[in-house]
Amino acid sequence: MKRLFLLTIFAAMFVFNQAYAQTTVFSDNFDSYSVGFQLACQNSVDWTTWNTTPCDPTTDAYISDTYSHSGSNSLKIVPNNDEVHPIANYTSGKYEVDCYNYIPTGHTGYFNTLALFAGGTSSWGFEVYFNPSGAGAINAGGTSTATFAWVADTWVLNQVVVDLDNDQAQYWYNGNMIYQWQWTLGADGTGCPLQLGGSDFFGNPTAPANDEQYIDDYAVIDLLVTPVELTSFTAATNNLGQVVLNWQTATETNNRMFEIQRKSANSDYATVGFINGAGTSTEQHSYSYVDQSVATGDFTYRLKQIDFDGHFSYSDEVNVSAVGPTSFNLTQNYPNPFNPTTTISFSVPQSGNVKLAVYNTLGQEVAVLVNGMVTVGQHDVSFNASSLPSGAYFYKLQSNNSVMIKKMMLLK
């Protein structure tokens, strides 16, 4: 019976880090609309214009299939377009407003995130300008508070994170955080309500390079929904020198899988395996993973939880010292029965001379798989019995004064 040597336990209730934990409140990739027709004119429930006049020939932007980030369509913003997605005036919580934008060479673009959408009394929380020659600038807590380089002829992800509980906001471009500010300072620093009220995609008629911007995969995301709640995460070694990871979840939301990652003191994290998640569940689930490839030494493990929509988050870390196998062991071959190849695994607690051989039922040696110096640890050996007849065989492992024998069946 295998013994588990428990080296590290973290059993308190915790959740995955929240940088990417989410549920989508609203999303639109514009593929359900007719190309060449105006957006709010086709969907006046989720979209409107700055003058709240869907189908307005000037402000209501058109659906285009010239460029798209996903699917076939996108929203084309040109001078005097002023398309708005009203958000529910959230006053608490943490939200992310996402969109991909594409600006052709020689053109410029702009959009903003509103604290309040109310016509002439609207209040801006954030503005971003994609100015000529790739010069990006934002108004966030004050005018021209940060600049960045933007890329033409490329779909790029824009993220505006608004934490209403802590009165903080961030703007991310292409996966990089450009600036963080106090949300209630507003776009120009004169102040705005502590709420999230909408998104506005505007085509500036006086832009020196002529605004032309394509928007796709727009989404409003609630970041405070816990996707996976862990009740425990443990790391241990068994007598084969393998690391055994066990974890339990109390709830799961949109959980596609866990990616198991490992690192040593002198290396970065690397993926060593995957375990499927339970999707969405309020029931307790238990998971286990055995890292058979780990060497001797000190290691750190973490779980990367991945949603079905590709977003991810990380667990806390657990540490373990792998000391190699603590016993002489021979496992059952796999597959068994087999035809014509099978794998035999064995482990030795110290380096030395080892012989692994196969015998028929008469005790005659029919194959020698290992015969010589073997290092400490687990070893896998492939046995090809294509030249042998069907029947029962025995394989024997010998090392110093230790011997183990197991039976296997060849079926042709």
Image: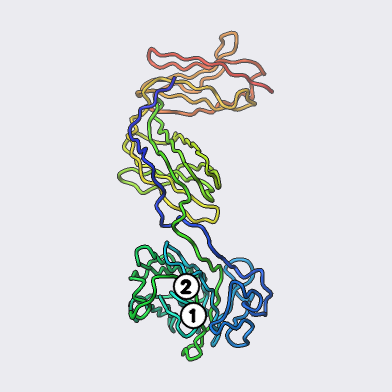
Q: Quadrant of the N terminus?
A: top left
Alpha carbons under labels 2 and 1: distance apart: 9 Å
Q: Would you call the spot at circle 2 few (<14 residues within 10 Å), some (14-19), or many (20 or more)?
A: many
Q: Is residue 344 left or right of residue 192?
A: right
Q: Quadrant of residue 322?
A: top left
User: In the figure, 57 relative to 313: above or below?
Assistant: below
For disc 1, the neighbor class at 10 Å (few under 14, some 14 to 19, many from 20) is: some
Q: Is the Cβ of the residue at disc 2 closer than 8 Å to that at disc 1?
A: yes
Q: Which residue is tagged 1?
A: 118
Hey, what amino acid is under mark 2? Gly
The mark total stands at 2
In this rendering, does residue 144 appear at all? Answer: no
At 54% from the left edge and 77% from the top edge, which residue is drawn? 84
Q: Percent from the top left, x then y, of residue 381? A: 50, 27
Specify the quadrant that holds the C terminus.
top right
Residue at horizontal 51%, vertical 41%?
275
272 and 99: which one is in front? 99
161, 246: nearer the viewer: 161
Disc 1 marks which amino acid? Ala
User: Label 2's element?
Assistant: strand
Q: What element carries label 1?
A: loop
- The answer to which of marks 2 and 1 sits earlier in the sequence is 1
Q: Measured along the vertical axis of the image, is residue 91 above or below residue 266?
A: below
Where residue 305 sits: x, y (%)? 47, 48
Identify the disc placed on residue 254.
none
Whether residue 158 is visible, yes or no, is yes
Between residue 116 and residue 170, name the one nearer to us.
Answer: 116
**Relative to residue 35, is residue 365 drawn left or right?**
left
